[in-house]
Image (tube, rainbow, N blue to C red):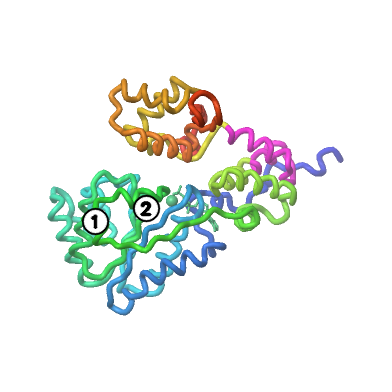
Amino acid sequence: MSMFKDMLRGDESLFRNEMALDFEFLPKVLPYRENEQRHFATCIAPLLQSRNGRNLFIYGAPGIGKTAAMRFVFRDLEEETDDVVPIYVNCWQKNTTFKILIEICDQLGYKLTHNKRTEELFEVVKGIVNKKAAVFAFDEVDKVEDYDFLYSLLEEIFKKSVFLITNHKDWLMELDQRIKSRLLPEVLEFRRYSLAETKGILKQRIDYAFAPGVWEENAVDAVAARTFELEDLRSGLYLLRESGLAAEAKSSRKVMTDHVREAVAKMDEFSIKPRSELDDDMQVILGLVKSNSGKKIGDLFRLYQQEGGQSVYKTFQRKIRKLADGKFVSIQSIKGGADGTTSIITYQSTKKLTEF
Ligand SMILES: Nc1ncnc2c1ncn2[C@@H]1O[C@H](COP(=O)(O)OP(=O)(O)OP(=O)(O)O)[C@@H](O)[C@H]1O
Ligand SMILES: [Mg+2]
């Protein structure tokens, strides 16, 4: 019997609340993002005094707390007042002016949107919001297909703050001048977490999600190190869950480095963002890299042009960099050689975490 002494029984679990490892879970406090949240709040504060708010452009890498920080500030705002309405739109899901206005109507509690045209929907929004004040957060804003909604909000809503969130710093530069000159946003970068911060966040999640004391310290360190390397907290949450499940599958009462290693091996087949996020041109470029993996960037560009690609070389380069940011491709710089420094682009045949 003693062999089974340290084994988990069928009715036992290492998890206390597995849902705390969901990407949408919002912990009670959001450590290391206090300054960013304060900055959000100072943009909103004038609205509480019936003045106009300020606008904010927020950018930073995937999985470093931008959405979480926004949701936090909105939760606080809702507890504080009824006079300022928080409206959060994920533009990945709602990517046209029409869909965005339907969503805003819905959040404002207006249900009679059926058969209404875009202009009519905007009149509804205007009628409701101009009696109060509102904060609009457009998350993943680079995914929207037209900016009419933004123009209309900026022109015709009197008391508001507009928050725009994206992974791409250059999105703002490319924004239509008519909108940019009305938006005049402050700019806030979310920097990546340090190793110590990454570990702090993961420990907080462990406390929420697992029974006390089941994680061995060096196993936590292993998850933190890997997450820090990947720079995306979502991969850390994934590793916590998978390591826990691996330990349970072996009926272990502790989560140990071996279990983390198993989880890491499983994750290596996945990366973070789904391919459906890419626009058509990016899809074409990714397809080209896929069938010509390991070629020089200049050669890829020539193939791209032969296939009717419209972007100029600079844009093409930028798109390749974005693909690398999303871990769809990797870029390797080769110095020297016949044509000076060049980049070799390799296709990464990984699946995405969100494709489960
Ligand atoms: N400081 C933090 N404390 C606790 N949890 C955090 C913190 N930062 C990020 N997280 C968690 O990491 C996950 C990813 O964060 P979030 O969704 O905010 O990323 P993001 O910056 O919006 O990424 P993307 O650009 O891909 O949308 C979420 O589950 C979030 O709760
Ligand atoms: Mg986000």
Q: Nearer the observer, disc 1 or disc 2? A: 1
Viewer-nearest residue: 298 or 196: 298
**Against 81, is 199 above or below?**
above
Left or right of 116, for residue 48 = right
Q: Can residue 205 be seen in this snapshot?
A: no
x, y (%) of residue 76?
Answer: 43, 69
Depth order, front residue of 330/111? 330
Q: Which residue is mark 1?
A: 179
Mark 2 neighbour density, 10 Å: few (under 14) some (14–19) many (20 or more): many
Q: Position of residue 189 (x, y in %)?
A: 45, 57
- Which residue is at the front of the view, 168 or 47? 168
Please give left or right for residue 97 compared with residue 7 in the image.
left
- Residue located at (33% from left, 44% from top): 143
Residue designated by label 2: 139
Residue positioned most to the bottom: 49
Disc marking residue 83: none
Return the disc, 1 or 2, that comes first in the chain's sequence: 2
Name the chief secondary structure element in magenta. helix
Residue at left 53%, top 34%?
Answer: 270
Callout 1, which amino acid?
A: Ile
The reply to whether the residue tagged 2 has its Cβ within 8 angstroms of ligand 2 is yes
Say which amino acid is labelled 2. Answer: Asp
Instruction: Examine the structure image and report whether residue 264 is included in the region drawn in magenta.
Output: yes
Q: Residue at x 65, y 44 (%)?
A: 244
Q: Residue at x 19, y 62 (%)?
A: 155
Query: Is any atom of residue 228 visible in this view?
Result: yes
Range covered by the magenta-colored residues: 243-268
The single residue placed furthest to the right in the displayed view is 2
State the separation of the CA atoms marked 1 and 2: 17 Å
**Residue 5, horizontal then vertical, whole percent:** 82, 43
